[in-house]
Image (spheres, rainbow, N blue to C red):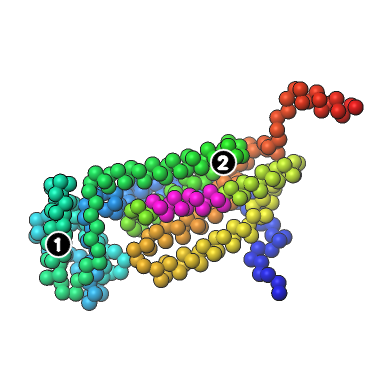
């Protein structure tokens, strides 16, 4: 029985032929993503902004009565709530600032949550409280700062690792690819306004790891081919290297996407944002390994001599003496 091969052994796709248009498109997408982040902002969860979030489902209603809820909660005297649809049209999240003094007396937060949920259930008998989360402002600020530092330090550490293992040009290429992947993922959350919390930070770190793994596989093959085919033009060598690793890339991405598709369609709503982030990350991570990390080596002047050890004067004299003898 012959094994199924999604990528034939003689595959020869000229990826580098379109490197300039793809670089332009990717640059525009990165720019657009950051514009959307600054204009729309990220829908930060309670993890990052502090406060209390109450998730409510109206079981007997097609849509949640957002306007009525806002008025009912405001009457309780805890300030203006932030109410957004969460998941299905009949599901909402109600975010409230913590009452003054709650840092010293956590009971005040519990009392506020109890009063709000009681008022909602009294006005809407079909209301079901799915969860109540509370995070102090100090803790949320620390979580946000730590999460952003984790993303930045992870990308820098990865670039240094690749720099040491290969050459500095490879480290720059890997860092550019990671910036591309993270920017597009953040742009997705700025456009869709899905909640951005600690789970999404974990998803982005996972994307960084996946993208790095895919990039290193391609870079390792490029390094081997640079030693093997010294006279081959670099664009052709990069195409050869990408094609030689394409079967592994396709199989890895496809198996992951099958699992992620099941989670997107059948998984719980609470991890939808996490799953959506990783799904996009698989696409952009694979794309950046081929069209970002590899072509940039041409502009960074990588040559066939990049991995040839530098010969000292003494070694040169000894080599010439051996050749004459």
Circle 1: is it few (<14), some (14-19), or many (20+) Cα within 10 Å?
Answer: few
The residue drawn where x is 73% and y is 28% is 311
| Furthest residue in direction right, as rendered | 325
Instruction: Give the image location of residue 77, x and y in percent.
Output: 9, 56
Q: Can residue 77 be seen in the rendering of this structure?
A: yes
Examine the residues drawn in magenta and state their main secondary structure: helix
| Furthest residue in direction bottom, as rendered | 60
The residue drawn where x is 59% and y is 57% is 249
The residue drawn where x is 38% and y is 41% is 149
The residue drawn where x is 48% and y is 66% is 259
Numbered range of the magenta stretch: 201-214
Instruction: Give the image location of residue 177, x and y in percent.
Output: 52, 46
> Is 211 included in the stretch rendered in magenta?
yes
Instruction: Give the image location of residue 294, x and y in percent.
Output: 60, 46
* Side of 288 where 198 appears, left or right: left
Residue 83 occupies quadrant: bottom left
Give the quadrant of the C terminus: top right
Mark count: 2
Cα distance in 3D space between marks 1 and 2: 53 Å
Secondary structure, mark 2, is helix
Q: Can residue 28 be seen in the rendering of this structure?
A: no
Instruction: Give the image location of residue 105, x and y in percent.
Output: 14, 49
Q: Mark 2 points at which residue?
A: 162
* Side of 155 where 323 appears, left or right: right
* Side of 41 where 137 appears, left or right: left
Is mark 1 in CB contact (under 8 Å) with mark 2? no
Q: Between label 1 and label 2, give the one nearer the viewer.
A: 1
Q: Residue 114 carries which label?
A: 1
Point out the tag, 1 or 2, that comes first from the N-terminus: 1
> Is 176 included in the stretch rendered in magenta?
no
Secondary structure, mark 1, is helix
């Amino acid at each position: 029985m012959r094994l199924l091969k999604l990528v034939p052994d003689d595959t020869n796709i000229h990826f580098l032929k379109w490197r300039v248009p793809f670089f332009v498109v990717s640059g525009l997408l990165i720019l657009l993503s950051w514009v959307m982040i600054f204009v729309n902002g990220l829908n930060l969860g309670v993890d990052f902004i502090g406060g209390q979030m109450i998730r409510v489902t109206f079981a007997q209603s097609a849509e949640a009565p957002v306007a009525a809820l806002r008025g009912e909660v405001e009457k309780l005297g805890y300030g203006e709530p932030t109410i957004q649809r969460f998941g299905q049209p009949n599901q909402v999240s109600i975010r409230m600032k913590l009452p003054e003094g709650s840092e010293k007396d956590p009971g005040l937060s519990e009392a506020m949550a109890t009063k709000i949920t009681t008022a909602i259930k009294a006005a809407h008998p079909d209301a079901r409280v799915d969860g109540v989360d509370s995070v102090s402002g100090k803790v949320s600020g620390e979580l946000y700062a730590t999460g952003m530092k984790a993303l930045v330090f992870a990308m820098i550490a990865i670039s240094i690792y690749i720099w040491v293992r290969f050459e500095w040009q490879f480290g720059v290429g890997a860092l550019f690819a990671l910036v591309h992947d993270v920017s597009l993922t953040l742009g997705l959350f700025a456009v869709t306004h899905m909640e951005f919390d600690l789970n999404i930070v974990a998803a982005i770190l996972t994307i960084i790891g996946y993208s790095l793994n895919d990039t290193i596989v391609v870079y390792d093959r490029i390094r081997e081919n640079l030693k093997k085919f010294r006279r081959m033009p670099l664009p052709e060598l990069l195409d050869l290297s990408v094609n030689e690793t394409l079967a592994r890339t396709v199989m890895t991405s496809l198996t992951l996407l099958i699992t992620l598709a099941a989670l997107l369609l059948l998984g719980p709503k609470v991890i939808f944002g996490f799953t959506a982030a990783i799904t996009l990350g698989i696409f952009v991570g694979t794309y950046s390994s081929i069209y970002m990390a590899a072509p940039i080596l041409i502009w960074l002047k990588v040559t066939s001599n990049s991995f040839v050890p530098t010969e000292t004067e003494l070694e040169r004299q000894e080599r010439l003496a051996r050749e004459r003898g």
